[in-house]
Amino acid sequence: MTNFNDCVRDVCLVGHSHVGSLYTWSKNWKENGMCLINVPIPSDSDYCPLNVTLEEELIREPKPFKYQAFWANHEEYGSILEDVWNQKHDGNGMDVLYCKLKSMRSALRKLNAESFSHISSRVERRK
């Protein structure tokens, strides 16, 4: 360990200060890695901005669907439910149920976006 510390000191590496959460969510809690950097500091200032970008492919998984009970109080909920449930689908009973639930999910997401999104700004506009 002494050799490593001597090497870090000899090549003027410094530990990069951490900003944000100690952990990152990615299927499991994972501790953020540490890095050492060598940044020449201008002689007239001890502040030197640094922007580090690590290239990594970001895979966004779809948000899980969660039914919100307040949707049932919306005036269009009954007609949406009836329209979706009356759609004809081919297949056995489980396939039909799956297709209807998938259609209902899409319809409820649309209802949510149109009627319940940006609640805070809507309240401000009505004041």
Image (tube, helix red, strand yellow):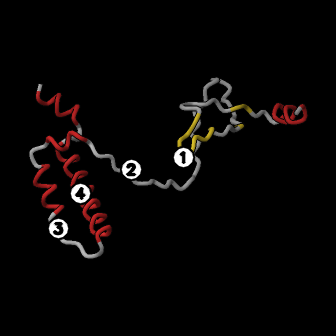
Left or right of residue 11: residue 81:
left
Q: Quick one: label 2 or label 3, which is nearer the N terminus?
A: 2
Decide: marks 3, 4 in contact (CB < 8 A)?
no
**Label 2 SS:** loop
**Which amino acid type corresponds to the residue marked 1 in the rendered image?**
Ser
The residue at which mark 4 appears reads as: 104
Q: Is residue 116 above or below residue 18?
A: below
Residue in the foreground of this view, choosing between 41 and 11? 11
**Residue 104, how many percent across, how many down?**
23, 57
Residue in the foreground of this view, choosing between 112 and 12? 112
Q: Residue shown at 20%/39% (left/top)?
A: 70
**Which amino acid type corresponds to the residue marked 4 in the rendered image?**
Met
The residue at which mark 1 appears reads as: 26
**Label 4 SS:** helix
Q: Quick one: label 2 or label 1, which is nearer the N terminus?
A: 1
> Mark 3 to mark 4: distance in Å?
11 Å
The residue at which mark 3 appears reads as: 87
Q: Nearer the viewer, mark 3 or mark 1?
A: 3
The residue at which mark 2 appears reads as: 63
> Mark 2 to mark 3: distance in Å?
25 Å
Q: Residues within 10 Å of mark 2 (few under 14, many from 20)?
A: few
Decide: marks 2, 1 in contact (CB < 8 A)?
no
Left or right of residue 52: residue 73:
left
Decide: marks 3, 1 in contact (CB < 8 A)?
no
**Residue 124, how many percent across, how many down?**
17, 28
**Which amino acid type corresponds to the residue marked 2 in the rendered image?**
Lys
Q: Quadrant of residue 9?
A: top right
